[in-house]
Amino acid sequence: MDWSLLGCGASGHVTFAPDEPALRDRLNVATREGPAWRCLRCGTFVIGEPMATGPAADAPQVRRAEQVRSALILRIFAVERFFRALIFAALAIAVWRFSASRLSFEQAYDQALPPLRALLRDFGFSVQHSKLLGLLHEAFTVDPRTLRYIALGLGAYAVIEVIEGVGLWLVKRWGEYFAMIITSLGLPYEIYDLMNKVTVLRVVAFVINLALVLYLVLTKRLFGVRGGKKAYEAHLRSESILDAEMAALDAESGVAARREPAALANAAGNSARAADRPATGPPWPSAETPAAGPLWSSAETPADAGPPRPDAETRAATGPPWPDAETPAGPSSAAAAPAIGDAAPTEPVAAKPAPAPAETAGEPPRGDASDEPAPPPLPRRRPAR
């Protein structure tokens, strides 16, 4: 059962518009029918103007969830206390009037007793051993001052029950303490009565009073039980919708405050790195620097440029273009070989001896000027993919 909805059904919704803008935006929503405000008890949005407005500290304290059930239980005990106060108040009035007019009551009793005895005898009842008539006979023999004291005691107990009932009905902290103390003081006397004689009325009264004492001590945390008043108030704040929204708003503000210095630090670090970066270098470390060489590693190297990597092909001036090429017999392995292609040359080219090493760095190697230079190698074909 949703006790909050039960409370709203019995007492109506409770809406409040705080003056704080951020908190105000969290408690209302715009609809086609107009603005709707969140109920502080059940949490539903109610269309219409709020019941009250002002600072958040002046918001009404609303019972919700378990607090509504607790208030209902306490008011049941309050009704029982009011009923008990009526009974004792009636007894106090009767004893007081009896003490003031005892002679007239005794005369009326003597006049009404004979016909009453005859009537009861006709119905088969004997009044000789009646407890009620015995109490009335003993009351006539009591001192009038004693009867007044009894009447005052009954009246005082009725007043105490009224105060106890009011405190429980209003669900006040002082009423809970007052009811617990007064009820616990009467428990020893009720236990004594039960030891003398067990009756249904005495048992029911003892069970009700004992249940009230235990319920107040445990659930209301009286006299420091289960953390005392601080723990009880903290539990009430944890169930409040307005306090929960304020805590969420504070948490969001704290997260934003922690993120702002971090963002400023990151921005400052990025600016410093951008200032230290060289103007001619690449914009990022992994970027390739444009150079005179090829843009990718698989590109073929022009003849006038050097090989891009160690396994690149070289000119055929110093040897065959591939290992399995046939070399014509000659005195040196550096002799030129015919290129292998689709068409072979019609005339074989005679091998020439390798040129002798130059004596100076600037002098070109000496060779046979009449010999024809070797033809350049054919371009290497890429395998089909």
Image (cartoon, rainbow, N blue to C red):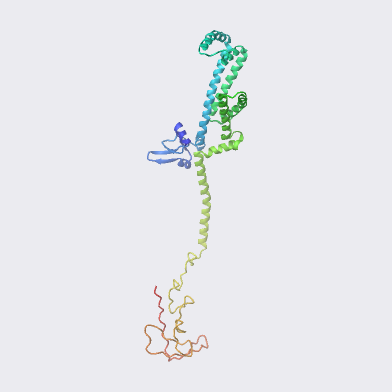
Which of 138/358 is in front? Answer: 138
The reply to whether residue 170 is in sight is no
Question: Relative to 354, does residue 277 appear above or below in the rendering?
Answer: above
Q: Residue at coordinates 52% horizontally, 26% vertically from top-left?
A: 79
Q: Residue at coordinates 53% horizontally, 24% vertically from top-left?
A: 82
Which of 189/150 is in front? Answer: 189
Question: Relative to 191, does residue 348 appear above or below in the rendering?
Answer: below
x, y percent for residue 294: 44, 73
x, y percent for residue 260: 51, 51
Which of 164/246 is in front? Answer: 164
x, y percent for residue 1: 47, 36
- Horizontal side of 9 relative to 182 (left or right) equals left
Q: Residue at coordinates 46% horizontally, 34% vertically from top-left?
A: 6
Number of residue marks: 0
Q: Quadrant of the C terminus?
A: bottom left
Q: Residue furthest front?
A: 124
Q: Residue at coordinates 52% horizontally, 31% vertically from top-left?
A: 73
Which of 57/189 is in front? Answer: 189
The reply to whether residue 76 is in sight is yes
Question: Relative to 322, does residue 367 appear above or below in the rendering?
Answer: below
Question: Relative to 164, does residue 17 appear above or below in the rendering?
Answer: below
x, y percent for residue 58: 51, 35
